[in-house]
Image (tube, helix red, strand yellow):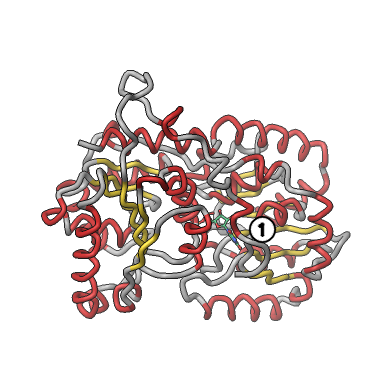
Amino acid sequence: MNGRPFTRQFPSVETVPAIAADALVDDTGKPSRRRPPSALFVDQSGQPGGAELCLLPLAALHAAHSEVLLLSDGPFRELLEAQGVRVIVKSNAQVSAIKRAGMRLSWLRALPGMYRQILAIATRARYFDVLFLNTQKALVLGALGKPLHRSPIVWHAHDVMTRDHFGKMQLRIVRWLVRHAIDQVVANSQATADALIELTGLPASAIPVVHNGIDVDAFMHADPVEAQSLRRRFNLPENAWLAGLFGRLAPWKGQHVAIESLTRLQDVHLALVGGALFGEDDYVKELHCLAARLGVADRVHFVGTRNDVPVLMKAMDVILHTSLKPEPFGRVIIEGMAAGRPVVASGAGGVTEIVQHRMNGWLIEPGNVAALADAIETLRATPNLVQCMTDRAVHDVQQHFALDAYLQQVTHIIARARR
Ligand code: UDP
C-alpha cells in the first residue's frame, strides 16, 4: 500500500464509541445488562474493499472479545491489526481463485481447500457467541459448517443477489443457505434486501437494512491545503478542473465511461484512484489503450490504491461514480458527500437511497457517457448549485450515514442473534 498509514482514515480504537455505554440495548430500547456479545467475524478478502472497510470499525469496536478470521491474507489484515483486532488467516489458493461467474470447475478443484476452511471456521466459531459472515465465500463456508459449530449465524449482505452480478448456481446456493442455515441477515441497502427477498421468499421484516456509516469528520475536515500539495505530488494539474473516480478498477465499475466522457469535455482532467484489487489487470491495460485511442491520455491520471482517500477527495472538483450494474451501496458516494464535493452517480441500486437528484448530488443513467459529460459541465458552470447541493449533502451524510449509528445498529443485531 502507498502513502501514509491507512489508519488515519478511520477512528482509532480510542475514538470508537464504548460498546457497553451505548451500543447495547434490549428489545425495548433500554440499555442491556448482558455482557457484550463475542463474535467471530469472517471475511474472504485480504484486500480492503467496501465490505471490508465496513467491517473494520465494527471489528475494532468488538476487539476486546472478538476475532476476525480472514480467508486470504493482505493489507486488510494490517488495517485490522493496527486497530487492535486479533486476526487469524486461513487462506487457500484454489478457494480464492473461485470467481463469481462460471465457477463449476473451479469449485471442484477447490473442494479440499473448502473443506479445510469450513473446519477452521467451525473450530474457531465454538469459542464465540455469534458467527458473523461478511462476504459471499464466508457465507458459504461458515454456513456449511453449522452442524459442526451450531453457533447462531449473522450474514451481512453487501451484494445485490441477482443475475446482474452472480451466476445461477451461486444464487441457488445462497437461497438454500439463507433459508436453512442463517439465523439473521442484515442488508447494506434496501436494494440488497429487495433482491434477497425476491431470491429467498423471506418476508421484508426478516432482513433489516443498515446503511454503511463513515467517520464523517475525517472527510469533512480533511485539510484542503494538503489537497493542493497532493495535486502537485501526483502531477495532477493544480488549476485544472479535476474529476475523481474512487474505487477498484473493474469493468462493472465503469472507469471506461468516465474516460469516454472526457472527449466531450474541454480541460477536464480525470484522476482514477484505486487499483485492480481482484486481478482485473487486462481491464487496466484496456483503460490505458482507450485513453490513448481517444486522445485524452494526458488528462487521465492513474493514481493507484491510496490510503488517504479523505484528503484526495478534497483535492477533486467533482466525484464520479460510474458503475454499470446496480451498486449494492456505494461508500465512495457518501465519502464524497462528506468531503463537501459534488457527486455524480449512476442512479441504480443502493445509490438511489443516498442521492436525491439535484438536491444532494446528481444522478445519471448508468453507462450514459453524454449524460455524465453534461452533468460535469453543468456543475462546472454553476457554482451556486454546487454550493447548495454540497451543503445539503454534508447535512444528509451526518444525519443518515454516521459511523456511530451504523455500529450501534449492527451491534444490536449481533446481540439479538446471541442465544
Ligand atoms: N478506497 C480506498 N482506496 C482507494 C480506492 C478506494 O480506500 O484507492 C475505498 C473507498 O474510499 C471506499 C471503498 O474503497 O471506502 C470502496 O467501497 P465501495 O462501496 O464504493 O465499493 P466496493 O469496493 O464495495 O465495490
Q: Image point 52% across, 80% down: which residue?
A: 282
Residue 325 position within the rendered picture, expressed as x and y whole percent measured from the top left: 47, 57
Q: Image point 59% across, 47% down: which residue?
A: 333
Residue 161 position within the rendered picture, expressed as x and y whole percent measured from the top left: 33, 53
Mark 1 belongs to which amino acid?
Answer: Asp
Packing grade of label 1 (10 A; few <14, some 14-19, many >=20) is some
Residue 61 position within the rendered picture, expressed as x and y whole percent measured from the top left: 45, 43
Vertical relation: 362 (above or below) 163: above
Residue found at the very far right of the displayed protein? 239
Which of the 4 image quarters holds residue 106?
bottom left
Which of the 4 image quarters holds residue 264?
bottom right
Q: Nearer the viewer, residue 243 or 291?
A: 243
Name the quadrant of the N terminus. bottom right
Residue found at the very far left of the displayed protein? 147
Q: Image point 44% across, 45% down: which residue?
A: 58
Locate residue 247 relative to residue 76 in the image: left or right: right
Label 1: state its secondary structure: loop
Q: Nearer the viewer, residue 41 or 282?
A: 41
Residue 279 position within the rendered picture, expressed as x and y whole percent measured from the top left: 47, 76
Look at mark 1 in the image and give the residue it sits on. 308
**Ligand 1 located in image quadrant:** bottom right
Locate residue 233 relative to residue 205 in the image: left or right: right
Q: Nearer the viewer, residue 281 or 411?
A: 411
Which of the 4 image quarters holds residue 388?
top right
Q: Nearer the viewer, residue 264 or 213?
A: 213
Q: How many marks?
A: 1
Name the quadrant of the C terminus. top left
